[in-house]
Amino acid sequence: MSVRPILRWPDPRLSQHCAPVASVTPEIETLADDMLDTMYAAPGRGLAAPQIGVLLRLFVMDATWKTGPRTPQVLINPDITARSETKVVTGEGCLSIPGVTMDIARPDWVEVAWTERDGTRQSGRFEGFAAVCVQHELDHLDGVVTFDRLSPEARQTAEFAYAEAVR
Ligand code: ZN
């Protein structure tokens, strides 16, 4: 178990489409443990593998730990299978884009299928902040960051704020 360095935008690895995990090997389990350690240490509520430079389709999240008990989750090869038609705007931060929050509209619930650490396929419905978290992390697996979800005008403002924040 170890904390790994988190890449910062515009590292090109954050813009890559990630490859599926072929099988849940001991190496993948170690990677998932390191990702959870890294997320909690950051501190954050979600972390995708490409954020530590591993271009594979998995992410970890814990939507509750900042206000309640820890509920660590590891989602391998996740796919959104259904989504709400209602969108809500949430101010989203990103561990790879520290210092800026961006208002992004996303479906207010999603249904997701994924592979668990034991190799079984699971599905579940995520609502509220957990839905935001799942969609944000899934975007990372497709090489999409919060800047990419903004209008050109909003992106310009956010990129300027980020440049100031990390200067
Ligand atoms: Zn992020």
Image (cartoon, rainbow, N blue to C red):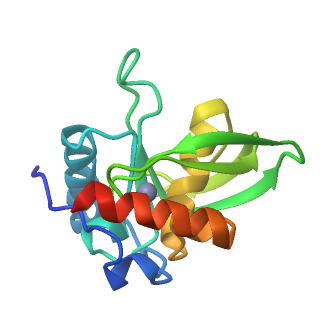
Say which quadrant the C terminus sits in: bottom left
Furthest residue in direction top, as rendered: 68
**167 sits left or right of 127 in the view:** left
Q: Which percent across, then down, holds residue 11?
A: 31, 79
- Pick the front one: 152 or 119: 152
**100 sits left or right of 156 in the view:** left
Q: Residue at x 65, y 51 (%)?
A: 104
Is residue 121 in sight in this rendering? no
Is residue 79 in sight in this rendering? yes
Q: Which percent across, then down, holds residue 80?
A: 70, 58
Check the image and report above or below for 84 versus 164: above
Q: Quadrant of ligand 1?
A: bottom left
Check the image and report above or below for 110 versus 26: above
- Pick the front one: 114 or 60: 60
Q: Residue at x 26, y 67 (%)?
A: 52
**93 sits left or right of 138 in the view:** left
